[in-house]
Amino acid sequence: MIYILLTLCLLFVLYIIFESMCKKMGDCDLKVNDIKEKQLRLADNEILLSFTVPFENRGKQQAIVIDGLFRLEPEGNKYNDFIIRSQIVNPELPVYHDNYWEAFLVKPGKKVVLKGSVSIKHKDGKAVYRNELPEEMYFELYYKYYGRNPVIYERKEFLIKPEDLEVVSGEVPVVKEEIPPVSPRKPVDESIKTIPVKTHILRETDTLMDVLNKYVIPLSQEGDIVAIAESAIAILQGRAVYIETIKPGYWATRLNRFFQQDASLSSPYSLEMAIREVGLWRILISFTVGSLGKFIGRKGDFYRLAGRPAATIDDPPGTMPPFDKYVVLGPKDPQKVSEEIKAKTGLDATVVDANDLGKVDVLGCTLKDREIIVKALKHNPQGNADEQTPIVLIRPPK
């Protein structure tokens, strides 16, 4: 009996120590300050109010701002004569015509400044003057974010008085939908030609062969190798899970704190999915061995033991919209996928996980010698983000 009590006491002490360590690590602390740089521009038949919205992370961990909505609060018939459109954009990200809010990171101690604008026009198209504007306009900003803990929901109200805005001259800025150009990277072996294949945004409703027949086969030649990003295959297989449908358990909200901030498994959502993929006990054993390995200078033991299903998980915002709000799991049976592509197209195929750091992980391949795959994709010509080129044709020298 005494041994049982001692064991329980030891477990309780270890639990307290573990919880204290988790608490000491802290979390993000995201604050949205009041709007700044408030300006008013006059143009033909339009008035534009512009301002900036600072998102500041005062916490110890990075924050992922997963979604947001900015809108004018209704006030009866106050705005009946006007067409009012409001928008907030992140100047570091592409601008979408439908005000899509792309997820972004705010590092500890850093600030991300968003740009807001409000366009005011008369419904009948006649000129609108400053003295016609409502004396007070209330706007609300809803946003949600997370760090080491699950999603936090916030609401911020802004009051804009036209009299408080600085009147500036110049044309009204036009916000256009645009994708920033991507600078091509220099290949490691220039004798191996790589042809990025642009596709539409792939979804679960698409089929792999339809995608290949539409985009790849018309560009292919005999001897080409089809290289597909692992995240694209996972999305086609329906292995992208919206984070708010995931309910992280105890271990996911604790162990995630011990991963580096930039690691996918630092999120409670991605770690919860890793636990579901490989099992809790495998994750616990991998974590324990990995932690002990770090004490003696070894790295990577966790992922070696947990396996590729844990290593290939992508957390927001690691994938292109609209999957920037999803946990994207690794693909199922990448070797089988590669073999099916070759059987149906006659082309050798590979499923790969490549990144901008020059790492190329071949998950499945119909070639025995995979070195040509690594050389060809070392400069990461794939782009399953804004480039929309998740497939690359590798053309070896003849």
Image (cartoon, rainbow, N blue to C red):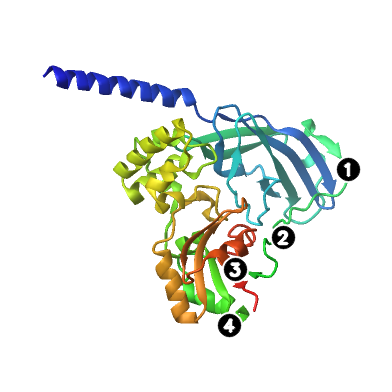
Query: What residue type is disc 2 on?
Result: Pro
The residue pinned by badge 4 equals 222
Residue visible at 72% across and 60% down in the picture: 184
Secondary structure under tag 3 reads strand
Q: Secondary structure at mark 4?
A: loop
Where is mark 3, residue-wise?
A: 392
Q: Are marks 3 and 2 in contact (CB under 8 Å)?
A: no
Q: Nearer the viewer, mark 4 or mark 3?
A: 4
Residue at mark 2? 184
First in sequence: mark 3 vs mark 2: 2
Q: Amino acid at mark 3?
A: Val
Three-letter code for the amino acid on which mark 4 is drawn: Glu
Provide the secondary structure element on which disc 1 rests.
loop
**Callout 3 environment at 10 Å: few (<14), some (14 to 19), or many (20+)?**
many
Tell me the SS state at disc 2: loop
- Residue of label 1: 169
Of the two numbered discs 4 and 3 on the same chain, state the one appearing first in sequence.
4
Residue 129, horizontal then vertical, whole percent: 82, 44
Which residue is at a point 35% across and 51% down the rendered structure image? Answer: 277
Q: CA distance from mark 3 to mark 2?
A: 14 Å
